[in-house]
Amino acid sequence: MLLMLAEPGIPLEQAIRFRRSVAGAESNVATGLARLGHRTRWLGRLGADPAGEAVLRELRADGVDVGHVDLDETAPTGMLLRDSHPQRAIDVQYYRAGSAASHLAPEHIRPEALEGARLVHISGITPMLSPSAAAATQRLIELARAAGSLVSFDPNVRRKLGGAAQWAQIVGPLLAEADLVLAGDDELETLTGRSADEAAAELLAGRARTVVIKRADHSATALTAGGRWDQPPFDVPVSDPVGAGDAFAAGYLSGVLRGLPEPGALAEAACVAALCVQTPTDTEGLPNAAARDRALAAFADGTDAVHR
């Protein structure tokens, strides 16, 4: 979607000046992975309008392949307005109804879009947009299986898209389809009706090879059949917390794709999230690999944080 971000500290209803950017769970992760040096491709639908062109231009600038994005001549690009306050609740207003993304359908997901993909990342937001978008998500999972790609899944529960029962009905079953699950403890409880640890144990008894639980205190736990690893958050000043979960996913998946053990992947995830929340917009703070490594050394080892 196109993101219009109010100037820092100004309530949305009083904001006059806005900063244009791009937001969206999957595109945020694609951008984060691209900056970290991975080849990424984003699949989706945008309106054939100036907002859609702005989204494409920004994704291309970050090296994200948008060659398989569909443009809708009749429906607009989705948009969100939000404000930014480090010390109080943030107001987010979505304009998704009737958008090009809500018209996503299985026929828009083509097998050639997955050629060469080692990993396919999805969120629970897309299937909640419409019945056709839910069917398209299932089609993507089926094609990922046929292509031999790992499937990672972040529920990204957004209550403005539906109530708890609707999320459990539409998105809950997707947990069992994923090889890698990254979810908040509250999200697992909402989607399964069980505690996060109970839900994780059940997923690991099925298809999942790793379940990463993001805790309310911003720590994270990775669970596999072979063990459990905990990662505390890095203590940083927070400018804008929105986008932290997607940044965490990008950092973690980068570690997975590079074959890091769980503690290393978790540490990189926490590092990328910590860098993200220190800047405005969902993507401005996403680092490249060198910046991630410098920050991680400073966080973990207490080395000089100034790059001289």
Image (tube, rainbow, N blue to C red):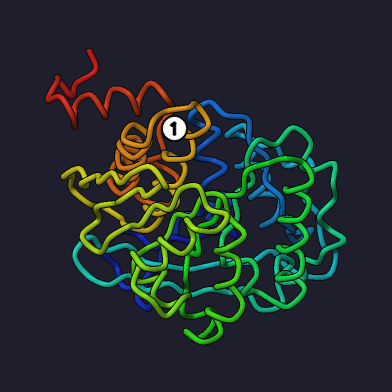
Asked whether, in this view, residue 52 is left or right of residue 191, the answer is: right
Outermost residue, left side: 302
Outermost residue, top side: 308
Q: Secondary structure at mark 1?
A: helix
Labels in figure, total: 1
The residue that label 1 is drawn on is 255
Give the residue at x 28% y 44%.
Answer: 229
* Amino acid at circle 1: Gly
Q: Splitting the image into 4 quarters, where does residue 109 fall?
A: bottom right
Looking at the figure, which quarter contains the C terminus? top left
Q: Is residue 182 above or below residue 229?
A: below
Q: Is residue 42 above or below residue 49?
A: above
Seen from the viewer's position, the closer of residues 177 and 121 is: 177
**Label 1: how many Cα within 10 Å (few below 14, some 14–19, many 20+):** many
Give the residue at x 85% y 50%.
Answer: 110
Q: Where does the image place residue 291, in percent across and percent down from the top left?
A: 35, 25
Give the residue at x 54% y 41%.
Answer: 31
Asked whether, in this view, residue 123 is left or right of residue 85, the answer is: right
Asked whether, in this view, residue 216 is left or right of residue 5, the answer is: left
Q: Where does the image place residue 112, in percent across and percent down from the top left?
A: 85, 41
Q: Is residue 285 above or below residue 141?
A: above
Looking at the figure, which quarter contains the N terminus? bottom right
Q: Where does the image place residue 192, in percent across and percent down from the top left?
A: 46, 76
